[in-house]
Each structure stands twice: as C-alpha cells, then as structure tokens.
C-alpha cells in the first residue's frame, strides 16, 4: 500500500505544477503515519514487558537484558557522534536536491532588504555602500557557487560515461527546479552547462541520452535572453500567486539599473519622482515573493541543506585546464600540398618552405 502511494505521489508531482503542493502534503502525511505506527508498536512492546511471541522475561527481571540495553544505548550514542558520510550528487534523488536548493535560495531571498536594491548601484561612487548590501551579495555569491558547482561536478570524473551520467542527473534536477518555479537556481544550472569547458567535451556529450539533450535544449530556450527573456517573463506572469516562486536575480538587477540610468534627474535639478515610482513598483514585486514559504509543503533534511549551502567546487580558473586533461585537443592534420607564392602552383610541404602561404 505504501509503495502504491509513493508511485502516486511521483506521478502527481511530475504532472501539472498546480498539484505539486498537494503531492508534497500527501507525502508528509504518509511519513507521519509511518512514524505514528512505529511508535505505537514500540509502546505495545513496552506495555507487554517482553518480546512479542518469545516468552522471554521483561528487562526488569533479567539483569542480562539490562546490560544489553545499556550497551545498545551506548552504541547508538557512538553512532550519533560519528561523522556521517558527506552527501554527493548521485546519492540524492533529483527531486530532493531540487527542493533543498529551492529552500536555500528562498532563505537568501527573504533576508534581502529593500534598501539593498537601491544601494547596490551606488557602490561605484562610494565603497562604503558594500556594508549595506551584505545579504544581496550573499545571494549573488550563492548563485555563482551553484554555476561553478555544476561545472566542477561534471569535470571531476575522468571517464566520459561517468561525466555523461552526471550531466543526465543534473538535467533531471534542473527539470525539477522548473516545476518548483525556482528560476534563479535554474538559470545557474543552465549557465554551468554552457561553460566553454563543458561544451567542448564531445566524447562526453556523445554518451548523453538524446532525451536529456532535448530537455536541456528546451531549458536553454526557456531561459534564453531572446526578446529580453520573453519566454521566462510570460511564464512568470502565468505562475499562480499562491505558489512559492523565486525570480531571476540578474534580470531584476538589470531592470532596476535600466530604470535608474535611463531616467535621470530633471533639468532644473529636481528629483524625478516618476523614476522613483517605477523602481519602487519593481522592488515591490520582489516583496510579494517573500510572502509564501516553501517549508509549508516541503520537508527538508539537515545534511542535504548543509550540502546545498556549501556546494564544494573546483576553482573556476582551473576549469579549462582540467577540461583539456579530460579530453585533449585533436591535433590538426596538415595537408600534403601548399600553395607557393613563387611558382604559383601547389607544391609539397617540404619544398619552398619559406614561401608557403598560410590559409
């Protein structure tokens, strides 16, 4: 019965995004029922005072049982104190990783205050404004970390098939991010895929499934900057306001800068209140996205959250060198004949070497 409910939740979550909160609530209630059932079994065992169907005496009557229970508790404490294995990309399901990335991105969005968007563009004039935009800088650095992590995760493996498996898993995570309306993190994933050190890996992309490549092309078209991110803007307007949505940060900052630069002060030196009103309306849209929290229908895990906040990656300066190590460049095949300027004919490469024409 539980397996059937799990399959039903996966089908509903992969369908229309409107049913995603309902699927998450159903999954949470199912996990609560499991816990209540396990606790009820434990209470029945405690009340009976013996193991069910074994005929053994209760722990209070048997000193050996008491010693075993004490040793078991010590072992459990030692297991808790031991360090857990670090979370990796292939161990976590794409839906779990996408949910936790969505939660981390929402936490960074909720901490940004309104004045930080105004003071962000004043930092060129006065460096003291850097102290007033700490939360916004943290959000921007987290976006850069995500894109660098996507690139580094692909380049870590030496085998082309292993890199292709990583690409397919990351594409699945990106599709889940689109269903969760986490557009900011989705754009970081697309940027990581389009890095030059990843695009040049021909042997790796040959092992990637065609279905994954088509879904990646669809995501790239969805987040493309054609017509000023036309597809993204249309899709964002259709998203219901009752769903937690994280907009694209770089596009918001670009729109605010466009309004700030193209609407200067008036000729008589007075403030342009029309310009300020447009900027205020743009920033008020961001405040609307803070109202709905993703924790209402998403259950999080502390280890996965810590992994999503950290996201260990390789330094970006070594991306291209590491890509050359994974797949070196093919040496160009030189032609046997070259055009000669002196005799105006095609000659072998050994003759007239000082008069060869470079094509």
Image (cartoon, rainbow, N blue to C red):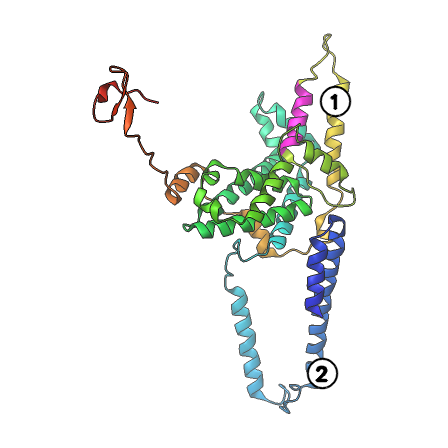
Above or below 75: residue 65? below
Q: Residue furthest top?
A: 268
Above or below 108: residue 116? above
Q: Residue furthest bottom?
A: 55
Residue 167: image x %, image y %?
A: 52, 48
The answer to whether residue 261 is visible is yes
Q: Residues within 10 Å of mark 1 (few under 14, many from 20)?
A: some
Q: Secondary structure at mark 1?
A: helix
Quadrant holding the N terminus:
bottom right
Instruction: Tell me where the magenta segment starts and ends, as one range.
Output: 250-261
Report the residue at 69% width, 73% height from top.
Answer: 38
Q: Secondary structure at mark 2?
A: helix
Report the residue at 73% width, 7% height from top.
Answer: 268
Instruction: Using the rendered view, name the quadrant where residue 286 is placed.
Output: top right
Above or below 81: residue 285? above
Residue bearing mark 2: 47
Residue 54: image x %, image y %?
A: 63, 89
Residue 70: image x %, image y %?
A: 56, 78
Residue bearing mark 1: 276
Q: Closest to the observer: 297 or 220? A: 220
Q: Would you say residue 259 sits in the magenta stretch?
A: yes
Q: Which mark is residue 117?
A: none
Instruction: Using the rendered view, name the quadrant where residue 331 is placed.
Output: top left
Our reading of the magenta stretch's main secondary structure is: helix
Residue 257: image x %, image y %?
A: 65, 24
Report the residue at 45% width, 38% height from top.
Answer: 200
1 vs 2, front mark = 1
The answer to whether residue 309 is visible is no
């Amino acid at each position: 019965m539980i397996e059937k409910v799990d399959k039903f939740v996966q089908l509903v979550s992969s369908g229309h995004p409107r049913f995603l909160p309902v699927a998450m609530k159903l999954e949470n209630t199912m996990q609560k029922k499991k816990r209540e059932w396990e606790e009820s079994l434990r209470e029945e065992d405690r009340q009976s005072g013996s193991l069910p169907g074994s005929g053994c005496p209760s722990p209070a009557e048997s000193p050996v049982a008491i010693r075993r229970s004490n040793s078991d508790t010590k072992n459990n404490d030692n297991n808790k104190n031991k360090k857990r294995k670090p979370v990796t990309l292939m161990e976590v399901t794409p839906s779990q990783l996408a949910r936790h990335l969505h939660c981390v991105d929402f936490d960074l969005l909720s901490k940004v205050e309104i004045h930080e968007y105004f003071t962000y563009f004043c930092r060129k004039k006065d460096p003291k404004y850097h102290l007033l935009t700490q939360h916004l800088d943290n959000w921007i650095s987290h976006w850069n970390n995500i894109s660098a992590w996507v690139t580094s995760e692909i380049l870590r493996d030496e085998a082309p098939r292993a890199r292709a498996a990583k690409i397919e898993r990351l594409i699945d995570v990106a599709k889940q991010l689109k269903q969760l309306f986490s557009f900011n993190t989705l754009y970081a994933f697309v940027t990581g895929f389009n890095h030059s050190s990843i695009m040049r890996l021909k042997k790796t992309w040959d092992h990637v499934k065609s279905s994954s490549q088509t879904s990646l092309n669809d995501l790239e078209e969805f987040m493309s900057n054609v017509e000023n991110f036309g597809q993204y803007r249309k899709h964002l307007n259709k998203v219901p306001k009752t769903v937690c949505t994280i907009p694209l940060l770089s596009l918001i900052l670009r729109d605010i800068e466009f309004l700030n630069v193209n609407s200067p002060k008036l000729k008589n030196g007075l403030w342009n209140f029309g310009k300020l009103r447009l900027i205020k309306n743009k920033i008020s849209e961001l405040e609307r996205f803070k109202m709905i929290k993703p924790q209402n229908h998403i259950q999080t895990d502390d280890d996965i959250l810590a992994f999503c906040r950290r996201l260990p990656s390789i330094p970006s300066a070594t991306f291209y060198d590491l890509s050359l190590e994974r797949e070196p460049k093919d040496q160009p095949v030189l032609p046997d004949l070259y055009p000669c300027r002196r005799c105006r004919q095609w000659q072998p490469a050994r003759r007239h070497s000082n008069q060869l024409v470079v094509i």
